[in-house]
Image (cartoon, grey):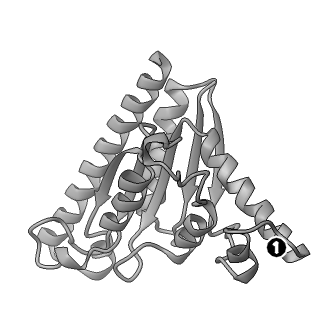
Amino acid sequence: MVHLLHIDTSPSPYSVSRRLAASFREVWNEAQPQSTVTYRDLVAEPVPHLGGDGAATLMAEPQTDGQRTAAALHNELVEEILAADALLISVPMHNWTIPSNLKAWLDQSLILGRTLPYDPRANPLAGRPATIVLAHGGDYTPGSEDAAMDHCGPYLRTVVEQVLGYQLELITASHTVTPFTSEDPVELEKAAASLRAAEAATVERARTVANKLVRS
């Protein structure tokens, strides 16, 4: 049975990234009605940031109750990742990078020898599909004036694609704050067009991934 791990990270009640992830899930559920899903809302139930107890267990067996609790969380998160045939994460850009709750989840989940292989040629996650839907308040697309300020997409591509080995697709909606800050019809159309394109790309990606996993 196919299994999806879905992570939401935005605290906004107007979240575009959550909206895109919901579109993915709608297509996924139609194409994979028998699939199972593990869902984590890192706003409603945040993963704690890596602390001393957690860091101590990364290189040695836990010795205290606090370390054992931290190790149990690591194991829970790792097992969720390893069990998932596909990964979906929704991410808003926060101050030009990823939200802190997603960084905490990554820090608690990426464990050397388990999700992070000692030998890259033996990566347990290599080739699995990952889809990350991003929401940018402004325009950070390649060639734009602020492109170099995007430390969100490039970071996620490094971790999820280059290091973890997922077959990754990043889908971005830009200008997402424009409807709240501008009445310029040209700017509003840019935002609307970007959202339409991101929604279409998300639906197509969900269909592609779901159908590929059905065949495999």
Is 68 rendered above or below residue 33?
A: below
Q: Is residue 183 visible?
A: no
Instruction: Give the quarter of the image for residue 139.
Output: bottom left
Whether residue 33 sits left or right of residue 94 in the image: it is right
Residue at x-position 41% and y-position 24%: 212
Q: What element carries label 1?
A: helix
Mark 1 lies on residue: 67
Query: Nearest the camera: 181 or 145?
Result: 145
Whether residue 111 sits left or right of residue 16 in the image: it is right
Q: Which amino acid does label 1 sit on?
A: Gln
Q: Can residue 93 be seen in this view?
A: yes
Q: In x, y percent, where is residue 123?
A: 49, 43
Q: In x, y percent, where is residue 4?
A: 57, 39
Q: Quadrant of the N terminus?
A: top right
Outermost residue to the top: 215
Q: In x, y percent, where is residue 27?
A: 46, 34
Q: In x, y percent, where is residue 164?
A: 45, 51
